[in-house]
Amino acid sequence: MSTRSYKDAVDHLNTLQSNAAALDAVRASGGRLSQFAIPEMLEYLERIGYTSTDLNQLNVIHITGTKGKGSTSAFTDSILRHALPGTKIGLYTSPHLVAVRERIRINGTPISEEQFATYFFEVWDRLVANVRPSPTTPPMPGYFRFVTLLAFHTFLSLKVDATVLEVGVGGTYDSTNIVPKPVVTGVAALGIDHVSVLGKTLEEIAWQKGGIFKEGVPAITLNQPGAGMRVLEERARELKASQFVIAPTIPELSEIELGLAGEHQRQNAELAVALARSFLKTQTSFDDESSLPQSFRTGLERTRWPGRCQTIVDPKRENVTWYLDGAHTVESLECCMHWFASPNVGLRPSHQKPTRVLVFNCTSGRSGSSFLGSMYTTVAAQLRLHQVNEPPEAFFDHVIFCANVTYADGHFKGDLTTLAIPEDDLAHLKTQHQLASAWSALVPSFPPSHTHVLPSIEHAVHEIEKIQSSEPVKVLVAGSLHLVGGVIEVAGLSDLAL
């Protein structure tokens, strides 16, 4: 008999993960399998005791995009919490960094382990008790679908006043897209680099994202590339959105220090302001017509979103500062390097050069050449911009390519377990060796002894601890949110980072 603890809940949840072969099958289907997602999600929702109409009680702000949707969600959540003190705001995002309960937050705080376990097993038991014979719908939902159902159940049980709901992948067929009438919908940036990575045209990606638009509901977006904007407008008309609006620029943003670092966060903040304003106008007596109300300013300044352009001074390792950014596309990695290779971050205002370390991983080593090449090019440009007399090939003193395995003994922290890495890849560190080869080709002069291919995140942290330097050691961790979360866990940074 299960003790029904948080650990038990995580163990049960991990049985719902798709392995690498299953994920390959979905990709090979060209997305056809995704078309069953909405009817299947509605069936699962009914099996746990709800109808889709019940979800309208959550007063949802639904947000998608190929980059920036998580940051936009965090900004929106923070604005609402400061504009509506005393209310209960739910936030659902993915993925998590260290603990799966981070995905479900109330007033900015992840639900407790006890709450997670309680609501988890309520959903689990209802699904088990109400199995319906079906030729297409599996008896149990996959990992993301289950956590989405759990979030809906949690928010309904706790009677939240508003819900900021981040799309997982895409939009049209995403598991979150079963709310019949959200209050407002938003589309963050459509990253050009996703076109080549996903093997889809910009029009196809925009069509997917625009699938969250609903009849009679405002649709708000940012300025998008031409074809993307045209398709979003078409989707807004097709799905009968009440209006289609481009979030206005806000000059005052340049006067405040956003809670999230990086120039690219300005446009995410502008979209969040537009979404929050639309929500408040329809749901409350809010009538502040100033371009940026004080509650909005405070919300933007106090936004926290771990693992995105985040700086952590290590409390235990002398002289070490961690720079954490889960950037995992060419465009987001360029933004990451604009941030890191700037004064008072990765650059020193004095003539002294800090010791810089890159810890990097990505889902496929084949992407390494474009990812690392983009980072290197951005560093070179930043050094010229800031007139730093330093060759770009010497910017990093060490580079570490490690697997996302948490511990040196080959095990994962329960919440960080992943079955998505092919076993052969993991056994031979295929991706990491491909990354090392790409780095060597990119920077032939880089000393081989300072390029490290390691089997776990714990190995990487130990390698950093070996570095002897009289200068500050600045460690950039990028390429994977899973990697960033593992570093936070292994390096003992949770209390400061999360």
Image (cartoon, rainbow, N blue to C red):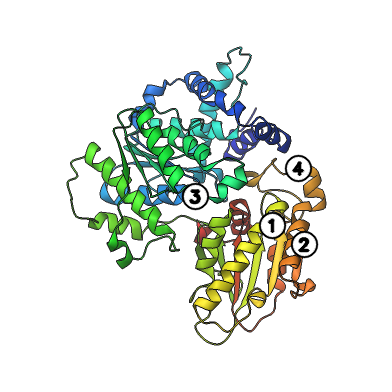
Report the number of discs.
Answer: 4
Q: Secondary structure at mark 4?
A: loop
- In contact (CB < 8 Å): disc 4 and disc 3: no
* Separation of residues labelled 4 and 2 (CA atoms): 20 Å
In primary-sequence order, the first of circles 1 and 2 is 1
Q: Where in the figure is residue 184, as x and y percent of width and height? A: 33, 37
Residue lying at 72% horizontally and 73% vertically, measured from the top left: 466
Q: What residue did someone put label 3 on? A: 67
Q: Secondary structure at mark 2?
A: helix
Packing grade of label 3 (10 A; few <14, some 14-19, many >=20) is many
Q: Quadrant of residue 1?
A: top right
> Any mark on residue 368, and which?
1
- In contact (CB < 8 Å): disc 2 and disc 3: no
Q: Where in the figure is residue 191, as x and y percent of width and height? A: 51, 50
Q: Secondary structure at mark 1?
A: helix
Q: Secondary structure at mark 3?
A: loop
- In contact (CB < 8 Å): disc 1 and disc 4: no
Describe residue 273's horizontal placement relative to residue 311 as left or right. Answer: left
Nearest to the observer: residue 7 or residue 194: 194
- In contact (CB < 8 Å): disc 1 and disc 3: no
In primary-sequence order, the first of circles 2 and 3 is 3
Residue lying at 29% horizontally and 42% vertically, measured from the top left: 87
In primary-sequence order, the first of circles 1 and 4 is 1
Packing grade of label 2 (10 A; few <14, some 14-19, many >=20) is some
* Separation of residues labelled 1 and 4 (CA atoms): 17 Å
Tell me the amino acid under the disc marked 1.
Gly
Mark 1 vs mark 4: in front:
1
Q: Quadrant of residue 234?
A: top left
Q: What residue did someone put label 4 on? A: 422
Does any portion of residue 5 appear in the rendered image? yes
Q: Quadrant of residue 124?
A: top right
* Separation of residues labelled 1 and 2 (CA atoms): 9 Å
